[in-house]
Image (cartoon, rainbow, N blue to C red):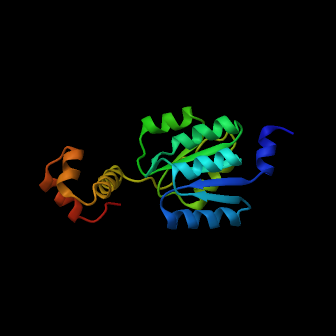
Amino acid sequence: MTDEVAALEDKTLLLVDDDRPFLTRLGRAMESRGFEVKTAETIAEGMVAVRSAPPAFAVVDMRLEDGNGLDIIEELQKQRPNARGIVLTGYGNLATAVSAVKLGAADYLAKPADADAVFAALMAGNEDRNALPENPMSADRVRWEHIQRVYELCNRNVSETARRLNMHRRTLQRILAKRAPH
């Protein structure tokens, strides 16, 4: 039996995300698709799960409160080289995508990713290529999402967010007052 066939028969899945409602929804959705799901909300919990019983599949958020989700992907590849790991992130950029793939991630999805996209990424063979999204986010929307994320990470402090984004505080206030672009 090849490693790929064994991975398809072993449907153990580790989900690691600090967004509990998202983690719960995705866990239920993956269970309904036949996976045996374990969840973790921190890097530490994820590492314990990988070391105690390395899963065949993993879906890991890139940024967690206690560190970088790529550490879990790297450990998973050490413990079980044929495992298929997917990285989710609200910070989509080329450098982190390259790092994720170099450390053994099979795919890299931008948040919010739905269960169908996650399932497709988990089940895709290495020869499968990602199809272009039917309705990709506009550049304005990507910019707005990034600004919102930094704003939240700065505990909704406009001055600190403006400093980190290297923009004028008033410009940031105008952006935050507007609705999200489509």
Could you tell me if residue 45 is visible in this image?
Answer: yes
Which residue sits furthest top? Answer: 102
Q: Position of residue 99 (x, y in %)?
A: 49, 34
The foreground one among 128 and 107 is 107
Query: Toward which corner of the image does residue 144 lie, by quadrant?
Result: bottom left
Q: Position of residue 27 (x, y in %)?
A: 62, 63
Q: Quadrant of the C terminus?
A: bottom left
- Quarter of the picture holding the N terminus: top right
The x and y percentages for residue 115 are 59, 61
Residue 55 seen in the figure: no
Residue lying at 76% horizontally and 46% vertically, measured from the top left:
7
Above or below: residue 88 compared with residue 3: below
Which one is in front, 110 or 161?
Answer: 161
Question: In the visual, does 112 lie left or right of 83?
Answer: left
Q: Is residue 43 left or right of residue 139?
A: right
Please report the residue visible at 17 percent of the width from the left and 54 percent of the height from the top: 159
Quarter location, residue 95: top left
Residue 3 location (% of width, % of height): 79, 38
Please state if 143 lies on the left or on the right of 63 as rendered.
left
Residue 109 vs 104, above or below: the answer is: below
Residue at 57% in and 43% down: 72
Marks counted in the figure total 0
In this rendering, the answer to whether 21 lies above or below 149 is below
